[in-house]
Image (cartoon, rainbow, N blue to C red):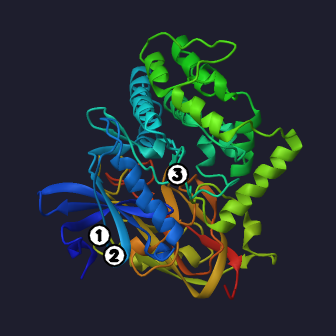
Amino acid sequence: MSTSERMLGGRYRIDGLIGRGGMATVWRAHDTILDREVAVKRLHARLHGDHELEERFRREGRLVANLSHPNLVRLLDQGGEEDEPFLVFELVDGQDLKTILRQHGRMSFERAASVCAQVARALAVAHRAGVIHRDIKSHNVLVTKEGVAKLTDFGIARIIEGDGDLTRTGIVIGSSDYLSPEQAEGKPLDATSDIYSLGVVLFETLTGRLPFTGENPVAVATKHVYDDPPDPRDHVPEIPQSLAQTCVRALAKDPRKRFSTGDAMAEALMGGPIEQLTSEPDMSETTSRMRAIRGPAPHRSRRTAIMWLAGILVLAALAGILGPKLMKDGGLHGSSSPVALRFTPLDYDPLGDEHEHADSVRNVTDSDPATEWTTETYTAATPTFGKAGVGLLLRFDGAHRVNEVRLTSTTPGATVEILGQGGTLANRLVISAATTLTAGETVIPITTDAPEAGIVIWFTRPGDQQVDGGYRAAVGQVTVMGAANSSG
C-alpha cells in the first residue's frame, strides 16, 4: 500500500508530507470519519523500539491534551498502529515563522509585536498548567493567513513537578540559537527560560537576524551565557523604544530580571506598562514553585562553565538526544582523518513525478563546477517548490560514517537538509541542520555518528533568483567527507 493510500487507526488517510524534524515527520491527512483535514505527527520509523523516545512522543500528546488556547495548536486525537505512535493535530493554514522571515525578511513592528504577544499568551497558559515548552523558536510558531500565531511542538516539554522526567540531568535540550543561559548550562529551568527564548524570537522578527551567532553551536550557546544581549535598535534604529526595551528585558541574563509571566510580556508588547522590577522580583506562583523545588544553582567559574557546556553538548549528541540543529563537530565521527567518499548520484522526487533532471545528475561529480544539476523550474509567486521538497540521492558503495557534505551552487537562498538512509522519505532521518546556500561552496556538517549507506541532499526551498519565470535550485559539485568502510 502506498503512503498516500495508507489509513492510520482505520481513520486517517495520509495525503502528503508537510515537514520533518529530528524525531518525527508531520503529514497532511484526511479524517475520514469527520471529513476534515488534519495534521498527523509520526515518530521516525528508525526510532520505533526506542522506548524512551516513544514515551516522550506519547507524553507530548498527554501534555497538549490538557492545554487549550486559541494560540496553541489543538490536539485532536492520539493513537498507535503496529507499534507506531501518532498524534493528530488541527491543520493550520499558514507557514511557520522561520519560513516567513526567510522569505520576506523582518516583520513590521506591529506585526512582530502581535505575533510574539500571541505566543506569550499561549506560554502563560502552558506555564499555569505547569508545563515548560523548552524549545521556543520561530520554527515552532505557525502563523495563519489571518495573522493568528499558534505555538506547536511540545515534544521536549517538561511537566514541572512530574515524576520520572525523561530528560537526563545535565543534558542540553533545545536549539542553540534560542537557548536561555540556564538552559545552555544544563541547569534546572523555570517558566522564564521560555520567556528568554521568546525574546530571541522577538529580536529575530524585529531585525531579521538572531541576537547571537558563532562558528558552531557551542560558540553560540556560550554567548547566550556570557554576552550582554544586543539592543535591536543597533540593527534597526527606528524600532520604537518601548518595543526594544521589551525585547532586551526578555533577554536578560538573570531570570529574575525577565518578565515573570507570559501575560506580562504580552501586555508590554501590546503597548501596556512594562512590569516593574523590585529588589525581590514578584515571581509568578508557577515560577516560585519551580525554584523552591530545584533549590539554588551551584556556582561555577567561567572557565569551568564553558568546559562543562561543551562537554554536555557533545555527550548529548552522542546519546542521540539532541535534534539535528545543535551539534557541529566532525570529531565525533572517529579519530581517523576524513576522506572523500565515493557515491553514485541519482535524482530524487518522491513527492512529484519521481523525475528531477536525471540526465544531468552526473554533473555533480565531473570535477567541473560550471556544469550543474538543477531541479526543475517551479512557477510560483515566491521561491517555492509547491511541495515539501525535491532532492539529490547519493548512494554509497557501503555503510560509511559521514562528517560533512560540501557543495557548490549558483542559486543562493536555496535551503537544504541532509537526510539519512531509508526506504521511503518518511523513514529518512534529518542528519544536518537546515542550511541556506550561498553563491560558491557551502559546507554542511553532519550530526549523527551512525553509518549511512546513502544520503539525500533535500532541497526545501529553491534559490532567490527567478529563472525562466520560476525558481529552481542548482548544484555544481558535491563532495562527501567521512570515514570510508566503517563497520558501524
The picture places residue 125, in percent across and down from the top left corner, at 40, 33
The picture places residue 395, in percent across and down from the top left corner, at 53, 83
Give the mark nearer the N terminus: 3 vs 1.
1
Write the residue at 63% across / 47% down. 176
Distance from disc 2 to disc 1, alpha carbons, whole Å, reads 8 Å
The picture places residue 159, in percent across and down from the top left corner, at 50, 47
Amino acid type indicated by mark 2: His
State the mark number for residue 412. Answer: 3
Say which of 116 and 168 sits in front: 168
State the mark number for residue 355. Answer: 2
Tell me if I can see residue 458 in this picture.
Answer: no
Write the residue at 35% across / 45% down. 66
Amino acid type indicated by mark 3: Pro
Image-based side of 39 in relation to 441, left or right: left
Q: Would you name the residue on which mark 1 appears?
A: 352
Label 3 secondary element: loop
The image quadrant that residue 225 belongs to is: top right
Depth check, mark 3 against mark 1: the one in front is: 1
Question: How many neighbours does mark 3 have within 10 angstroms: few (below 14), some (14-19), or many (20 or more)?
Answer: some
Q: Are marks 2 and 1 in contact (CB under 8 Å)?
A: yes
Say which of 251 and 370 sits in front: 251
Distance from disc 3 to disc 1, alpha carbons, whole Å, reads 23 Å
Q: Check the picture and name the quadrant holding the C terminus.
A: bottom right
Say which of 478 and 182 sits in front: 182
Depth check, mark 2 against mark 1: the one in front is: 1
The picture places residue 415, in percent across and down from the top left corner, at 49, 55
Residue 205 sits above or below residue 231 on the image: below
